[in-house]
Image (cartoon, rainbow, N blue to C red):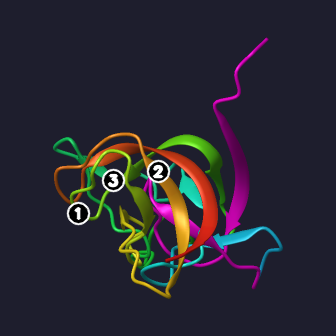
Amino acid sequence: MSDITAIDQSFHLDENVEIGKFTCLSARATNYTDGCVHPAGANAAFLGIAQESILPDAMADYSGGQYTLTSGTAWPAGSIPTTGQGRNIRTRIFGISRVVANAPIARGAVVIVAATSGYVETCPAQAGTTYNVVGIAIDAAGAQGDVIRVLVMPYLYKA
């Protein structure tokens, strides 16, 4: 018997922006029925975590031991290819994934999308608020930019 550790799905990038590896994505079907975009903001609806970057050729998002690209950055003019829109992006929709932290996160914390960057943060659990949960932190994050493992299991949570 084999173990299933993750479920990935490919989606079409539905905007002309750069997407960083290990950042959260949201669904949008403006141009593609299976479209995805960078999150609109904190606690945005969650689709999955990008398992690869969408960048112009010859660009890197990893430097000095950290992922430095902010998802949602405008696609540079004069780049090759000329657009990121329409490119397939492999996305983790369930299972264990790495993800970039927006701030320190305790091991075992419930995490949500932090901002348009697609990073995650601890769910604040303010009474009466509904949260779009990404999953549970398997590792602790000490600072913004740390890459941690998360058990991706999206659900809505009302504090």
Q: In this view, does 101 lie to the left or right of 12?
A: left
Find disc 1 in the rendering and name its residue: 103
Dot 3 corresponds to which residue?
A: 61
Residue type at mark 3 is Asp
* Image coords of residue 140 (percent x, y): 27, 45
Circles 2 and 3: CB atoms closer than 8 Å: no
Of residues 111 and 143, the one drawn nearer to the viewer in this rendering: 111
At label 1, the amino acid type is Ala
Q: Does the magenta stretch include residue 77?
A: no
State left or right for residue 74 relative to residue 156.
Answer: left
Secondary structure under tag 3 reads loop
> Looking at the picture, how far across and down is residue 37, in whole percent?
59, 74
Residue at 38% in and 47% down: 108
In percent of the image, x 32 and y 45: which residue is there?
107
Q: Amino acid type of disc 2?
A: Ile
Measure the alpha-carbon separation of dots 1 and 2: 15 Å
At label 2, counting other C-alpha atoms closer than 10 Å, the crowd grade (few under 14, some 14-19, many 20 or more) is many
- Is the C-beta separation of discs 3 and 1 under 8 Å? no
> Mark 2 highlights which residue?
136
Gap between marks 2 and 3, in whole Å?
A: 25 Å
Asked whether the viewer can see residue 69, the reply is yes
